[in-house]
Image (spheres, rainbow, N blue to C red):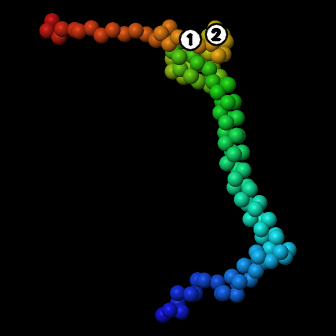
Amino acid sequence: MGADLNLNRPPLFVLIAIGLLLLLPAGAGRVLLDLAGGLLAVLLVLPVLLGGLGWVGWKVLQSRMQSCSACGAVGLGSNLQCSVCGTSYSSQPAAETPTGVSIPASDLTIDITAQDVDSDS
């Protein structure tokens, strides 16, 4: 019954041979170490490259976005009209403020006051 547990393990001489290939400065050992180093380099560099490509893609997408002057919804510039209110983007005036100029939020909000209403009448 104890012999059945060792069926899935490679023979001991195979493990010793792989260990010697890695430890000896032979051509096969160097090839294996170079391959492992290359794979490690790819695994370390790939997330940085993908993150950079994602950032560039996000900036390109942001440059194509425009906001509707009627309702303030943001949509892609390739659309002909706003998907929320239906206002045509081509009939909207050009941006009045250059990029980077901030507008106070109090100029862009609507003040709403609550009133009590009697339900007895």
Q: Nearer the viewer, residue 102 or 118?
A: 102
The answer to whether any part of residue 95 appears in the image is no
Amino acid type, callout 1 = Ile
Q: Nearer the viewer, residue 25 or 93?
A: 25
Q: Which mark is residue 2?
A: none
Q: Is residue 95 left or right of residue 85?
A: right
The answer to whether any part of residue 30 appears in the image is yes
Q: Position of residue 85 (x, y in %)?
A: 51, 17
**At 56% from the left edge and 11% from the top edge, which residue is drawn?**
103
**At 64% from the left edge and 8% from the top edge, which residue is drawn?**
96
**At 14% from the left edge and 9% from the top edge, which residue is drawn?**
120
Point out the tag, 1 or 2, that comes first from the N-terminus.
2
Task: Check disc 2 and report the residue beneath it.
Answer: 97
Q: Position of residue 1 (x, y in %)?
A: 48, 93
Q: Quadrant of residue 81?
A: top right
Residue extending furthest toward the right: 27
Task: Check disc 1 and report the residue beneath it.
Answer: 103
Vertical comparison of 61 with 106: above or below: below
Q: Position of residue 106 (x, y in %)?
A: 47, 9
Q: Position of residue 104 (x, y in %)?
A: 53, 11
Disc 1: CA contacts within 10 A as few (<14), some (14-19) or many (>=20): few
Q: Is residue 24 left or right of residue 118?
A: right
* Cα separation between marks 1 and 2: 9 Å
Indicate the secondary structure of the residue bearing disc 1. Answer: loop
Indicate the secondary structure of the residue bearing disc 2. Answer: loop
Q: Quadrant of residue 34?
A: bottom right
Amino acid type, callout 2 = Thr
Q: Quadrant of residue 6?
A: bottom right
Question: Do residues under tags 1 and 2 come within 8 Å of each other at their CB atoms?
Answer: yes
Q: Nearer the viewer, residue 109 or 37?
A: 37
Figure quadrant of the C terminus: top left
